[in-house]
Image (cartoon, helix red, strand yellow):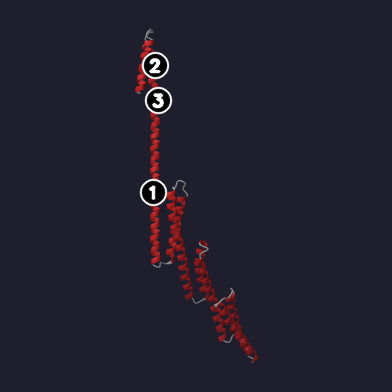
Amino acid sequence: MVVAATAAAALFFVLWWVLQDEENPWIPAGLAASVVMLVAASARQVVMRHASTRHVVDHERERHSEKYRSGRRSSIQEQNEALRTIEKQSAAADANDSLPEAHLELFQLCGEFLERTNQALASPTLSTERRLAWRTRQERAQALQKHHLLSWARDSARMHTHDAQQRVRLHEKIEVANRALDCIDTALRKYPDEEELNRSVTAVREFISSARVAHWVEMAQRASFKGYYRRAIDRYRDALFYLTRDDPEGERAAAAQQITREIELLRARLATHKAVGLDHESDERFS
């Protein structure tokens, strides 16, 4: 504005000197100087408005940037705290022989933590250093998640199998043992190649098979004691079916041979009864 005022004054005097032969030369000279001042004032207003707008935009951008950085620092701090909490609860669950539900809860907490880390890693603005830090936390949470799911499956299967062993009726034994299989199958869907889980499945299935065999052997022994030899043979055959449904090896083969010998002895006894005329009485008792 100082430069504009100087230029307007110079223009005024120059025009006044040029137009001094005219009547009232100061009027056109004053008008010209006024035009210069009006143009300068308009230009100044435009420049000031632009500067003001730029200042506001820069301020808002800085405020949002600071808010974003603060939020990101807060998010990282929250995730660090969440992981430390999970690690403390994990150590407590392992040290105190907690119930299976405690391990299942920790498995779920690890899953929630991993969901948040996946969201953070999906951000394109995440720096390489922070991405590596997130990866480290993610790997730690994944290890804890696997550990507690396996612990839950193992302890649950052990608890249900022990409960099944205390049951008297066969259908109750099988029902409770199947709950153990359900727990193991849940873990297998997540970790299908885990050898520990596959061994647990084999052990529970062997228990179910043994329970069925023991049930039918006991029924056969009762029938044989009462003289119902045909019924005893049928019961032994049922036991042999469950025993040899899979390829018999080791103790299973020895047990199958023992049952086969019992069947042969019963057949021989039944033949003897027929020879002495007691078969009719045995048939009546069997019926």
Helix, strand, or loop for circle 2? helix
Q: Is residue 43 left or right of residue 234?
A: left
**Of the numbered discs in the image, which one, if any, rests on residue 43?**
3
Closest to the camera, between mark 1 and mark 2, is: 1
* Callout 3 crowding tier (Cα within 10 Å): few <14, some 14–19, many ≥20: few
The type of residue carrying mark 1 is Arg
The image position of residue 164, as x and y in percent, is 49, 73
Look at the image and tell me whether residue 244 can be seen: yes
Left or right of 284 on screen, residue 76: left
- Inspect the image, locate mark 3, and give the three-letter code of the amino acid beneath it: Ala
Which label belongs to residue 73? Answer: 1
Residue 116 seen by the camera: no
Q: Earlier in the sequence, mark 1 or mark 3?
A: 3
Q: Is residue 67 above or below residue 7?
A: below
Dot 3 or dot 2, earlier in sequence = 2
* Alpha-carbon span between mark 1 and mark 2: 61 Å
Amino acid carrying label 2: it is Ala
Q: CA distance from mark 1 to mark 3?
A: 45 Å
